[in-house]
Amino acid sequence: MGREIFYFLIFPGILFSGIIGGLLSWFDRKITARIQFRQGPPLLQPFYDFFKLLIKETIVPSKGSRFTFLVAPILALFGAATAAVLILLPALGINSGFNGDIIVIIYILNIPSITYIIGALASGNPLAAVGASREMKLILSYEVPFLLVLTSIVIKSGMSISVSDIISVQIQDGAFLGSISGIIGFIVSILCIQAKLGLIPFDIAEAEGEICDGVVIEYSGTPLALIKLTKYIMLLAVPSFVLTLFWKGLALQGINILWAVLKILFVVLLLTLIRNTNPRVKINQAMKFFWVWMNLFAIITVVLSILGL
Amino acid sequence: MSLKEKIFKKSLWLFHLSAGSCNNCDIEILDCLTPRFDVERFGMKLVGSPRHADVILVTGIVTKKTKPRVLEVYNQAAKPVVVVAVGACPCTGGIFAEGYNFAGPLDKVIPVDVYIPGCPPKPEAILAGIVKFLNKK
């Protein structure tokens, strides 16, 4: 019991992934600034943001549902932390002895998005309701291709649904990224996690200039700080999940630490470059993009992996 | 300076409120976000909702029509919040001080922390005002 609580709160859980995710978020902002020939924020900026939000006043909208509004960010944080633990334990080479965790991870990775929807609808703000409906449609769009890509991974790893087995198959036979179906699947899953993390071009649910931060419009103070922390944790957890599926995970022994850091920075760099070179799409365009094109590529991935390519 | 105040000043999120301006000061505020001036190096960024705001940048004279709106935005913002009057109009009324729809300078409506005069203030002047505020106390 004590070990599980340690896992959840300290090592791969809230504290560790919050700090690393905050640094990744700084990396994202700094690269964005350098692309635009700006200087960018200082290294500790994500943590200043987080602690500043903790000392601010918390306002609860009078027309909303107080309990649901305040509980939603806590559930989001717990969901993200659980996902981080389940992803990072096998990725870092610690065997959790849990078979079939890939299915649990798929479910738990959706909890933050769903709690954003619940919190937004509980706030009683019309713009938040618009954001919530967009977030809902976005989940429906990106989940199908992501699940198809996961199916191809399961087929390639010999019908194994445990993350540690998938990693050990890759260590024996080489990373899945080395095959044709692996490359197509990697591209599809990068675009899916772009939508999952709510980054431009798929930040439709939080469009700043359009619906004023959408789902988080009514949050202030501590609940907003928890949502920020959730976003930092997701920025570490989701890219590590993709790395686990396609690129042998993040082993932390000796020189491998350097490789692990470089791999995760590479994926975040890809996300940042996509985010800085594309305008925001409309929700119907996003749904068409995922349902037609990404599904097509994901089905090709599945077929290729059945053929063994 | 206490730790709380230090953290607060390291991460100021700006909300931009136009209370009936001629759009000149608004453009100069947007200039501050461009690569040449880049306020993000101080940790500042524009936010869309007054709930997230730490700083409310008010431009333009407060007219009789916008006075209740300014008050409402100020009441919606999570405290502590800093109010900055950008330009001559919210500071004193400027050339519109004699106008029939003028509802008093901004500090008659809500408490103001920083005054940045000018018509419009240059981005350098806005940055100088921000730096003076950050170094206060």
Image (spheres, helix red, strand yellow):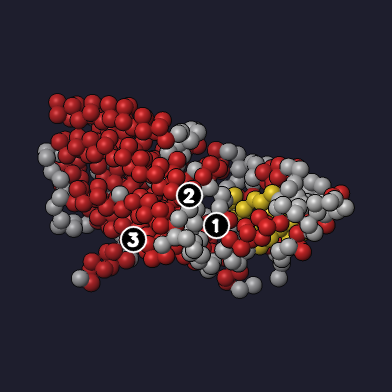
- Give the x, y percent position of residue A73: 39, 60
Crowding at label 2, few (<14), some or many (≥20) Cα neighbours within 10 Å?
Answer: some
Q: Is residue B110 above or below residue A88?
A: below
Q: Distance between the residues labelled 1 and 3?
A: 21 Å
Contact between labelled residues 3 and 2, with CB atoms less than 8 Å apart: no
Identify the residue at image location x=15%, y=50%: A100
Residue linked to disc 1:
B52
**Front residue of A229 and A142:** A142
On the same chain, marks 2 and 3? The answer is yes
Identify the residue at image location x=30%, y=49%: A110
Identify the secondary structure beneath mark 1.
helix
Residue linked to disc 2:
A126
Crowding at label 1, few (<14), some or many (≥20) Cα neighbours within 10 Å?
Answer: many
Q: What residue type is labelled 1?
A: His
Chain of the residue where label 3 is placed in the rendered structure: A
The disc placed on residue B43 is none
Identify the secondary structure beneath mark 3.
helix
Q: Is residue A70 something one can see in this rendering?
A: no
- Give the x, y percent position of residue B62: 75, 54
Chain of the residue where label 2 is placed in the rendered structure: A
The disc placed on residue A75 is 3
Where's the N terminus of chain A, which quadrant? bottom left
Q: What residue type is labelled 3?
A: Leu
- Give the x, y percent position of residue A69: 41, 61
